[in-house]
Each structure stands twice: as structure tokens, then as C-alpha cells.
Image (tube, rainbow, N blue to C red):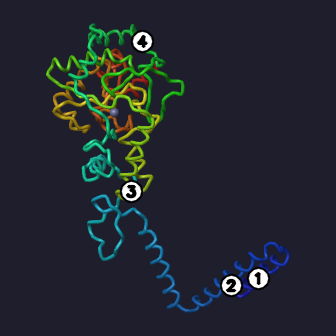
């Protein structure tokens, strides 16, 4: 039966080669391989020992090739060579989806820094080489700015609930920019100078000035950095982050995935339209989550809405924003919207959903 089949295959192939001269070069290697296969089968088929040897070799091959996959990563985040003698608890299964907050913290550690000349230490937000100014310098520069008037939180909430206060999703202050929504092609704005090299949308300068003054009156010296960033700067920051993760042994996909959780993609950052500011204070200048636990951080989370700002990436809303908690990243949306968003404890994404469903 086997010989018959082998003969038939041989004949068919030779026939094919004769009929199609063009393919005759191709037929020879196919013929050689199939003849080898038949010979090998015949060699092993009649001998139990040989057959089990072959099965073992095949099993070893399958096992070995699955272990050469980068799925075994040691607890310090580095990929390790699979070694049967070393198969103890120091090796754990780390699939790609297992990237959690601890990983981000780990990678923000200073041991990973210094790979870039202008990397700002302790800065997971990716704003290297950006000037920082504190509130007194900003206020001196913004003198004469400010609205002076303030609608109370209660007024705004009541007006919104009664339907007297209506929001329009076309309002520039509410523009939604995230991983799914890039900056609209026709979006335009004018840059205003806060102080020195710090710039932002000039329409928010009055409210910013009021907020810095109010914080100062409460005893907090806020620091502002990197409000407006060019798309080029954003791209440089993003690529630098991806490279750093790859230098730590991650694949490009893993590095990209992780980087996009801590730095927004170029073209999808509110910093590029001058409506976002990174704010910390003189006693805690790092862009780290612990800023949220400082008195200044708490005051900002509570009161920035009175000046039109929201904590854009709140804790517990990572599943909505796709960005880790950033107590320092404030987004201007205008006093009314900021008040509603903050008091309802929602995100800009959820606010948009609310407006669209109304
Ligand atoms: Zn930011």
C-alpha cells in the first residue's frame, strides 16, 4: 500500500514535470523531499525503538521552540534564557497583558534614567529639558490678568441640573483629545506667553492667573511646567520612552503599549493645543503620583475647577482615560464644565457621553 502510494506520487510528479517544462526545476526538489519522507517512514514504521526515538526527538523540538518565546521573564522584568536546571520560582510566566502599575513604577525608577542626555530625573511624564517656573514668577508676569469674578459652585450645579446651563460639544474648551480622538485638523488657537518659554492657549491666561493667586493665598507655591509642547517635542518624548523600555528588554510592541500609557501619542496630546498644564508645587516638584497626597495636590484636585481646570486623568478612571493616574496634569475646560465634571467625579470622556446622550 505504502509502496503503491510512493510510486503513484513519484509518477504523478514526473508526469507533471514533463508536461510543464517551466515547473520541472520545481518538481525535482519536491520529488526529492517526498521520496525522503517515504523512505523515512518506511525506516521507522517497522521498528518500535526507532519510532519512539523519533517521537521523543519531535517532542523535544516542540518543547524547546515554545520555550524560546519571550514569555518567561524574571521578576526584575528581564527576559531570561530558559534552562531546565534553573526552572525554579525565579522564573514566572509574564504574558504581554500582565503590564500593571508596578511595572510603570519600576520603569520610572532612576536606574533607568540617564540613558538620555536631557532626561529630567524622576520625570515619568516625558518632559525632558523643560523650564519650570514657580507661581511668584508666573504671577509677576501675569499681572493685570484675571477675571476677578467667580460664580459659585452651587450656582453652576443648580443651573446645569435645571437645564438652564447647556454645554455645546463644539465649544473649543471642551475639545476631546485622547487615544481615540486626535487633534482636529482644523483646530486653531493663539499661543499666549505665561512667562519666559512657558506658553499656553492665550484664552486661559486669566483663569490660570486667578488660580495661581488663589493657591498662593492659601499658602501653596505652585509650579507650572511644559504647558504647550510642539508635536515634534511630543514625538521625541514618546520615542525616547519607547527606546528606554526596549533597552530594558521589552519587544517593540510591549514598549509601545507601555509608553502609550504614560505619554500620550503625538497628535493626541492636550499639551499640543496649549490647554493642558503640568502643575506641582515647590515642596514636591516631581511629576509623580504622590503629588496627589500632598496638601497642594489635594487643594488643586478640589479647587482647580473653580478656575476652569480638571484633573484630567483621575485615580480609578484609568479604564476610561486609558492613562494612568496623573494628579499633576490639569486640563482647561472652562469654569462651568470643570465644576460639573469635578463635582460629579467623572472624566471629560464621560462628560461628553453625558452631553451626547442629552
Ligand atoms: Zn501633562
Cβ atoms under marks 2 and 3 closer than 8 Å: no
Q: Is residue 265 above or below residue 152?
A: below
Q: How far apart are marks 1 and 3 (CA)?
A: 51 Å
Q: Quadrant of residue 210?
A: top left
Q: What element carries label 1?
A: helix
Is the N terminus in the top left, top right, bottom left or bottom right quadrant? bottom right
- The residue sitting at 42% across, 12% down in the picture is 166
The residue labelled by disc 2 is 35
Q: In this view, does 144 lie above or below 232?
A: above
Q: Distance between the residues labelled 4 and 3?
A: 47 Å
Earlier in the chain: of badge 4 and badge 3, it is 4
Q: Distance between the residues labelled 2 and 4?
A: 80 Å
Cβ atoms under marks 2 and 4 closer than 8 Å: no
Quadrant field for ligand 1:
top left
Q: Distance between the residues labelled 4 and 1?
A: 81 Å
The residue labelled by disc 3 is 250
**Residue 111 percent across, percent down from the top left:** 25, 53
The residue labelled by disc 4 is 166
Amino acid at each position: 500500500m505504502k509502496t503503491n502510494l510512493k510510486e503513484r506520487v513519484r509518477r504523478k510528479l514526473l508526469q507533471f514535470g514533463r508536461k510543464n517544462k517551466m515547473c520541472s526545476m520545481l518538481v525535482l526538489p519536491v520529488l526529492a523531499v517526498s521520496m525522503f519522507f517515504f523512505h523515512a517512514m518506511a525506516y521507522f514504521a517497522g521498528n518500535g525503538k526507532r519510532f519512539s526515538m523519533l517521537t521523543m526527538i519531535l517532542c523535544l523540538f516542540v518543547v524547546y521552540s515554545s520555550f524560546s518565546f519571550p514569555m518567561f521573564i524574571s521578576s526584575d522584568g528581564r527576559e531570561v534564557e530558559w534552562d531546565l536546571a534553573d526552572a525554579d520560582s525565579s522564573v514566572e510566566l509574564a504574558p504581554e497583558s500582565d503590564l500593571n502599575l508596578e511595572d510603570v513604577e519600576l520603569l520610572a525608577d532612576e536606574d533607568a534614567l540617564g540613558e538620555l542626555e536631557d532626561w529630567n530625573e524622576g520625570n515619568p511624564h516625558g518632559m525632558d529639558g523643560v523650564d519650570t517656573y514657580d507661581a511668584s514668577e508666573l504671577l509677576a508676569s501675569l499681572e493685570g490678568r484675571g477675571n476677578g469674578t467667580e460664580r459659585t459652585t452651587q450656582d453652576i450645579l443648580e443651573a446645569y441640573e435645571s437645564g438652564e446651563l447647556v454645554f455645546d460639544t463644539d465649544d473649543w474648551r471642551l475639545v476631546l483629545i485622547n487615544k481615540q480622538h486626535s487633534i482636529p485638523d482644523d483646530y486653531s488657537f493663539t499661543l499666549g506667553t505665561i512667562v519666559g518659554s512657558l506658553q499656553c492657549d492665550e484664552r486661559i491666561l486669566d483663569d490660570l492667573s486667578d488660580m495661581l493667586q488663589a493657591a498662593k493665598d492659601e499658602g501653596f507655591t505652585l509650579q507650572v511646567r511644559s504647558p504647550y509642547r510642539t508635536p515634534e517635542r511630543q514625538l521625541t518624548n514618546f520615542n525616547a520612552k519607547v527606546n528606554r523600555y526596549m533597552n530594558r528588554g521589552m519587544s517593540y510592541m510591549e514598549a509601545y503599549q507601555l509608553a502609550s500609557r504614560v505619554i500620550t501619542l503625538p497628535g493626541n496630546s492636550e499639551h499640543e493645543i496649549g490647554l493642558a498644564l503640568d502643575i506641582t508645587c515647590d515642596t514636591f516638584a516631581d511629576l509623580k503620583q504622590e503629588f496627589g497626597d500632598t496638601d497642594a495636590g489635594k487643594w488643586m484636585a478640589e479647587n482647580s475647577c473653580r478656575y476652569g481646570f480638571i484633573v484630567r486623568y483621575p485615580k480609578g478612571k484609568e479604564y476610561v482615560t486609558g492613562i494612568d493616574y496623573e494628579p499633576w496634569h490639569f486640563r482647561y475646560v472652562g469654569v462651568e464644565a470643570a465644576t460639573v465634571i469635578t463635582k460629579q467625579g467623572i472624566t471629560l470622556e464621560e462628560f461628553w457621553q453625558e452631553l451626547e446622550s442629552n
